Image (cartoon, rainbow, N blue to C red):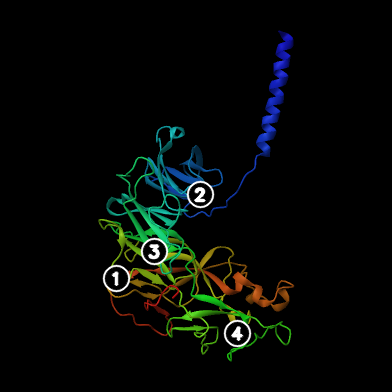
Amino acid sequence: MRSLGIVLAVVGAVSGFVAARDARAQAFTNFESGHVRPLALSPDGTRLFAVNTPDNRLAIYGVGVGTLTLQAEVQVGLEPVAVAARSNSEVWVVNHLSDSISIVQIDTTTPSLSRVSRTLLTCDEPRDIVFAGSGGNRAFITTARRGQNCPIVPDLANPGQPRALVQVWDANSLGAALGGTAIANVLLFGDTPRGLARSTDGPLSRVYAGVFQSGNRTTAITETVVSPNAQGLPPDPVESVYQNPKPPVGLIVKFDTASSTWKDERPASNWNGQVPFTLPDRDVFIIDANAATPVLIGGTNNVVGVGTILFNLAVRPNASGQIYVSNVDARNQVAPVAAVAGAGVGVGGGRLRVAGGDRFCIREGTGNHDAIGAKVRIAGDDDIGPSRKRPADRDEGLAPHHHGLADRQRLEARQVGFQPPRHATARPDHAVLRDRGNENDFH
């Protein structure tokens, strides 16, 4: 018997070693899904909910005076990127890779007993969630118009089709037992939606949805088109390091809505003959959250010219209800470094600083929305834009036009606020952007 016990002990030790080695050898795929709303506080402020994206969990923390205490973790779907607390005992988690929503029942007495009570199936790659409508009982979720669970046919072969969706659920009546049933699928004329925000009025009557990569009405034309054209290339920058003669290259041009003209950085240029289409640039959409079936508001229901890549939205809780949109606004049609000096933005210590005299608001009326902007930029002690450095300090081996993000883009937040319908009067230091009704798809 003693010999048998020794043998069993040895076998157990070897099995444990092999199991531990296999556990260490397991492959792990990190999808690196971007956080959108990774934290949420319970309405009573006693708990903090955080998504653990690579481990597919919701972490529940107790909030103390200057402390956080991990109380429990709940397994949810794959790659959770957003969380919202509907009540102290109900939390919704957006699973980006699973194309689903996990509704977590929080046990307020024994948090370790918290569990997923329901799973809703969404369209492709859901990203954000807000509760709005009367009583905050409707859940709005941004998704793409595709995916195996999507009730809307993608229609990818036809131009001019909305590719983005905001799906809406009645939190008090979720529908089908398996996967739930959305009460509305609001189509947005964009590709991939991302951030959401809700108005701060009593009935929570508006939901604002931002298109992630909404673009900025730029496109490229090739060298074979540019070289034989009489306009040629823009002049060289002062700091040019190009060889002489320069190699033939193409151009990035941008559609100017004021003149309905494709232009490079020269105001008088015109490339309409070479670019036989226009591009949309619809950034933020406005949804009526209290309609019997939630829909885009009547009249002009979107704002243009906000930014190139839109990240998150937030509404300032005051009477004006300004919307802040964090975004990167590209200046990619301006190639030389010298021409964009001061336009690049540094990302350093994270201070917010007003970057210009513009003001930005949406005036909600029956005809259009006037956008009069106020740009706020992230600034710090170490601005990273190469245009702020001496030529000798620039990275060796990089021509000026290779400094991509720092020189051609600026990180900013644009403030949007609602005012009574009226005509906009622009002072000289104001930039007025209007929806001119020419955001068409390829034609």
Give the CA distance from mark 1 to mark 3: 14 Å
The reply to whether callout 3 and callout 2 are in contact (CB within 8 Å) is: no
Find disc 2 in the rendering and name its residue: 97
Please tell me whether mark 3 sits on a helix, a strand or a loop: strand
Residue 316 visible within the image: no
Q: Give the mark nearer the N terminus: 1 vs 4.
A: 4
Asked where in the image residue 1 lies, by quadrant, the reply is: top right
Find disc 3 in the rendering and name its residue: 188
Q: Give the mark nearer the N terminus: 4 vs 3.
A: 3
Give the CA distance from mark 1 to mark 4: 40 Å
Q: Give the mark nearer the N terminus: 4 vs 2.
A: 2
**Side (left or right) of 90 relative to 329:** left
Residue in front for this viewpoint, 341 or 103: 103
**Label 4: few (<14), some or many (≥20) within 10 Å?**
some
Q: Residue at x 42, y 85 (%)?
A: 428
Q: Position of residue 10 (x, y in %)?
A: 73, 20
Find disc 1 in the rendering and name its residue: 299
The reply to whether callout 1 and callout 4 are in contact (CB within 8 Å) is: no
Q: Which numbered dot is residue 226?
A: 4
Residue in front for this viewpoint, 381 or 90: 90
Type of the residue with mark 4: Val
Give the CA distance from mark 2 to mark 1: 35 Å
Q: Position of residue 3 (x, y in %)?
A: 74, 11
Please tell me whether mark 1 sits on a helix, a strand or a loop: loop
Residue in front for this viewpoint, 108 or 285: 285
Q: Position of residue 341 (x, y in %)?
A: 60, 79
Give the CA distance from mark 4 to mark 3: 35 Å
Classify the position of the C terminus by image quarter. Answer: bottom left
Q: Give the mark nearer the N terminus: 1 vs 3.
A: 3
